[in-house]
Amino acid sequence: MTNVLRRYESVKIATEYFKFRPKYSSDVLKAVMKYYKPDWNRSSRHDLMVEVGCGSGQATNHFAPYFKQILASDVSRQQIELAKRQNQFPNVSYEIGSAENLSLVDAGSVDLVLAMECAHWFDLPRFFDETARVLKPDGCLAIGGYWFPKLVPLMDGKDDLKFKVSDLLEHFLVHGKRHDMIRYAQVKTQFPNVYEAIPWNKKEKQNVQVAYGDWNLATAKGFMRSMDSYQLHMQHIFDLCQNQFPPHTPLDLDSAEVFSKRVKELLEVPQAIDDNVKFRALFDVFLLLAKVG
Ligand SMILES: C[S@@+](CC[C@H](N)C(=O)[O-])C[C@H]1O[C@@H](n2cnc3c(N)ncnc32)[C@H](O)[C@@H]1O
C-alpha cells in the first residue's frame, strides 16, 4: 500500500492524470451495462455502483446517470480531492478507501463493482472476497484497463508512420517502467492473472476501442507525464543531476522531450511546435466481466 501511495499521492501526478488520461467513452459504459443487463438502455437506473481505484473520476462520470447512487473510492488523497472538485453529480460521492476493504458497504447491496486501470495494484483474494460480499446475487464485477494508445499522425502522406510513432511512445514509456516491469506486463497482456483469479464461472473478456481525434504532441507528452513510472524515472535523474555542479534540470534526459524531438524528426517537421503535430489516439480498452450468480 505504501508503494502505491507514494506513486499516486503527488499533486503533480494527480493533476497530469486528470488532464491527460483517457476518459473512456459511452461505448465502454454500454459494454459493461449490457453485460450486466442485456436489455439495458439509457433510461435504466440501477440502485448502487461501487467503484474502487476511481482516480479522479475518469470512468465514474459515464456511469453516474445510470445509478441512483455511486460510492467511488481510491487510496490516494490527491486523486480523491481532484475527483470531488470535478464532480457534477449529486448521486456520486468520493471517499478515500481501499479496494480490499469495503466495510462501509452493506452485504448484497451492490449492482456493479467497477475497477478501471487499477487491479494490477490490488491484493486480489481480499478484493474478490469483498466484492462477493457486497454484490447482489445477480450483481456484476467489471475490471478494465488499457495499454498505451496507437498514435496515427494527421498529416498528409504520413499515415504509414503510425506504427513507428506508436513504437516510439511505447519505447520511452516502457523505459520509464523498467523498475516495475512485471506489474506493467500484466496491463499490456490485459490482466491474464486477474482474469484467472476471478473466482466465478460466469466471466468473459471484451475489447472496446476508444478514439480521440484531438491529440497532439503536447497531449502525448502530458499522457507520458501522468505515468507514475515516468515521475519515478525523472525523480531519479533529477537526484543524480543535483549532485553535479551547477545543478540543472536536464531537458535532454527528459523522456517526454526526447520522444517529442524524435517524433518530429520522423515526421520531417523538426521545427514544428508540439501543439501543431496532430494525431488520432486509439486506445484498446479491455474489460474482464463477471457475475457472481
Ligand atoms: C492508473 S490509476 C486509475 C484511475 C482510474 N480508475 C482510471 O481509470 O483512470 C490507478 C489508481 O488506483 C489507485 N489504487 C491503487 N491501489 C489501490 C487499492 N488497493 N485500493 C484502491 N485504490 C487503489 C491509485 O491510487 C490510482 O489512483
Image (tube, rainbow, N blue to C red):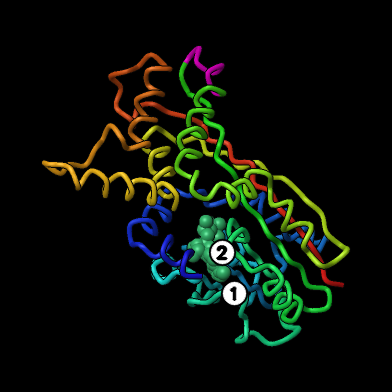
The C terminus sits in image quarter: bottom right
Is 7 placed left or right of 167 in the picture? left
Q: Secondary structure at mark 1?
A: strand
Residue 31 x, y percent position in the rendering:
73, 53
Q: Is residue 238 visible?
A: yes
Q: Secondary structure at mark 2?
A: helix
Whether tag 2 and tag 1 are in contact, CB under 8 A, the answer is yes
Q: Determine the CA span between mark 2 and mark 1.
A: 8 Å
The question of residue 157 being in magenta is answered with: yes
Residue 269 x, y percent position in the rendering:
35, 16
Q: What amino acid is found at the position of numbered circle 1 in the picture?
A: Ile
Between 180 and 270, the residue placed more toward the observer is 180
Residue at image position (49%, 71%) is: 75
Between 11 and 19, the residue placed more toward the observer is 11
Residue at image position (81%, 67%) is: 199
User: What label sits on residue 283 in the rendered view?
Assistant: none
User: What label sits on residue 70 in the rendered view?
Assistant: 1
Q: Is mark 2 within 8 Å of ligand 1?
A: no
Residue 125 x, y percent position in the rendering:
71, 71
Magenta stretch in the rendered image: 156-162
Q: Which residue is mark 2?
A: 60
Q: Is mark 1 within 8 Å of ligand 1?
A: no
Between 198 and 19, the residue placed more toward the observer is 198
